[in-house]
Image (cartoon, rainbow, N blue to C red):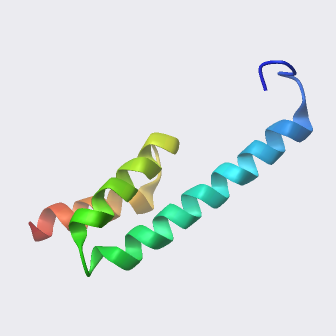
Amino acid sequence: MREHPDDIGRRIQLAKQREKLVASLLMEADRTRTEDSAMAEPLYQRVLEIDANNQRARTGLDYIRQKQ
């Protein structure tokens, strides 16, 4: 990316990879939240590191904190 900052195709590819990673992390966090919130919390936090405005991750963390 640094070598070709104007490469639109590469930007699109990276955005798609990021979306897939976020979706996968959220799916795993949602699945584990009811079973083991200690395992779900870092997954939601990782999503927020990637996408600080992700409402689903924020909601998941709020749910976990309310249950503690």
Quadrant assignment for the N terminus: top right
Taking the image as shown, residue 33 lies to the left or right of residue 20, namely left
Residue at (36% x, 49% y) in the render: 45
Quadrant assignment for the C terminus: bottom left
Taking the image as shown, residue 2 lies to the left or right of residue 63, namely right
Figure check: 22 above or below 64:
above
Question: Which quadrant holds residue 62?
Answer: bottom left
Residue at (34% x, 75% y) in the render: 32
Residue at (49% x, 62% y) in the render: 25
Q: Position of residue 55 (x, y in %)?
A: 43, 57
Q: Position of residue 31 (x, y in %)?
A: 39, 78
Question: Which quadrant holds residue 10?
Answer: top right
Q: Residue furthest left?
A: 68
Taking the image as shown, residue 30 lies to the left or right of residue 51, namely left
Q: Residue furthest top?
A: 3
Taking the image as shown, residue 10 lies to the left or right of residue 50, namely right
Q: Position of residue 5 (x, y in %)?
A: 83, 21
Residue at (13% x, 66% y) in the render: 66
Closer-to-camera residue (20/54) = 20
Q: Position of residue 37 (x, y in %)?
A: 23, 69
Question: Which quadrant holds residue 33?
Answer: bottom left
Closer-to-camera residue (3/26) = 3
